[in-house]
Image: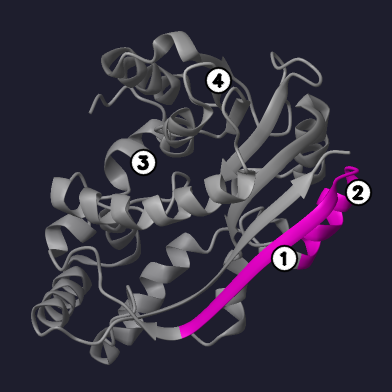
């Protein structure tokens, strides 16, 4: 991975999985479920034109290519030109470049996409990075043809804040709870009310999509609290090179910022031991699939 890549590309291509191929494959297996959930709700037909907003490495977009068939097209859009370059290289290698288009654009300003020019708009975990979410829904409606479908997936990150949370990665590391709190504080930037990743919930999504004029709105909401799960890796060296999102530091960077040298040694010793012992891990989160139709 080139160090000159933008932060979005660095995270998608390296920091999300700590640069570890095995962890990346486990993550890909999870993301494939979300991909299929979005595409199934999009009701894509052969010959459709699909716009995948915030395409990243093309998870949804390349999946859509299989569904639009030889006469359909997929428009890959993202704020990251580095990620669009990655998608273009993959499309060329896969022999599908003639059915792809690549547009640098933000979700709330889809300039370069003509009015009523696509049949389907998809997103996955994109609106959490968008401050002007209402504007994004208005843009989705603008570019869709009458009868066009919108299908999105979003985590409701604010939900976890309503449930008391301790530990790290769901690990019970009570012996270093004081150090974990210091590390977690590094990631708590600004007030939740001003943070686009935290300042909305599923009710806001319904309000915004209806406000943009969509009809036939259907939502599938899922909340999980303290549900046992398996970490994608128990390798501390991989975990410390990972980051929870493109805007956040890696765990290694957060630890260096929050802890003294002696504290870092104690923190790492206990976390390594918890990982080696197979300490119980759990997750708390809420997610939403949303489907709607432009009349």
214 in the magenta segment: yes
Q: Is residue 201 left or right of residue 176?
A: right
Tell which of 221 and 16 is nearer to you.
Answer: 221
User: Which residue bears the numbered disc 1?
Assistant: 202
Determine whether the residue tagged by mark 1 lies in a helix, strand or loop. helix
Q: Residue at x 32, y 13 (%)?
A: 95
What residue sits right under mark 2 in the picture?
211
Check disc 4: other Cα within 10 Å, few if <14, some if 14-19, many if 20+.
Answer: some
Could you tell me how far apart the alpha carbons at marks 1 and 3 are, in whole angstroms?
26 Å
Q: Are marks 2 and 4 in contact (CB under 8 Å)?
A: no
Task: Classify residue 6 as left or right of residue 162.
Answer: left
Disc nearer the start of the sequence (4/3): 3
**Residue picked out by circle 4:** 72
Q: Which residue is mark 3?
A: 11
Q: Which of the 4 image quarters holds residue 110?
A: top right
Single out the mark in the foreground, 1 or 3. Answer: 1
Residue range of the region highlighted in magenta in the rendering: 203-225
Q: Earlier in the sequence, mark 1 or mark 2?
A: 1
Image x and y of residue 200, in percent: 72, 62
What colouring does the structure picture have?
one colour
Location of residue 142 with respect to 163 vertically, above or below: above
First reached walking from the N terminus: tag 1 or tag 3: 3
């Amino acid at each position: 991975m080139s160090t000159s890549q933008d932060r979005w590309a660095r995270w998608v291509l390296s920091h999300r999985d700590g640069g570890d191929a095995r962890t990346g494959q486990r993550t890909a297996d999870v993301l494939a479920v979300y991909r299929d959930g979005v595409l199934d709700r999009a009701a894509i037909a052969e010959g459709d034109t699909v716009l995948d907003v915030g395409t990243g490495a093309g998870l949804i977009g390349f999946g859509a290519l299989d569904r639009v068939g030889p006469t359909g097209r997929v428009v890959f859009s993202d704020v990251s030109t580095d990620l669009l370059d990655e998608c273009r290289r993959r499309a060329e290698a896969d022999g599908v470049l003639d059915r792809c288009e690549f547009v640098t654009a933000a979700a709330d300003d889809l300039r370069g996409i003509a009015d009523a020019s696509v049949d389907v708009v998809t997103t996955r975990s994109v609106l959490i990075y968008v401050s002007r979410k209402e504007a994004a829904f208005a843009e989705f409606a603008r570019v869709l043809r009458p009868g066009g479908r919108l299908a999105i997936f979003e985590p409701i990150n604010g939900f976890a804040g309503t449930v008391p949370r301790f530990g790290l990665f769901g690990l019970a590391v009570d012996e270093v709870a004081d150090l974990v709190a210091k590390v977690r504080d590094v990631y708590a930037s600004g007030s939740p009310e001003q943070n686009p990743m935290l300042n909305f919930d599923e009710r806001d999504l319904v309000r915004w999509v209806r406000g943009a004029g969509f009809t036939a709105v259907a939502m599938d909401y899922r909340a999980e609290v303290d549900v046992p799960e398996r970490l994608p890796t128990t390798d501390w060296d991989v975990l410390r090179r990972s980051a929870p999102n493109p805007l956040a530091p890696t765990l290694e960077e957060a630890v260096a910022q929050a802890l003294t040298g002696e504290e870092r040694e104690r923190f790492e010793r206990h976390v390594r031991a918890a990982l080696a012992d197979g300490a119980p891990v759990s997750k708390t989160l809420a997610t939403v699939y949303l489907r709607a139709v432009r009349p």
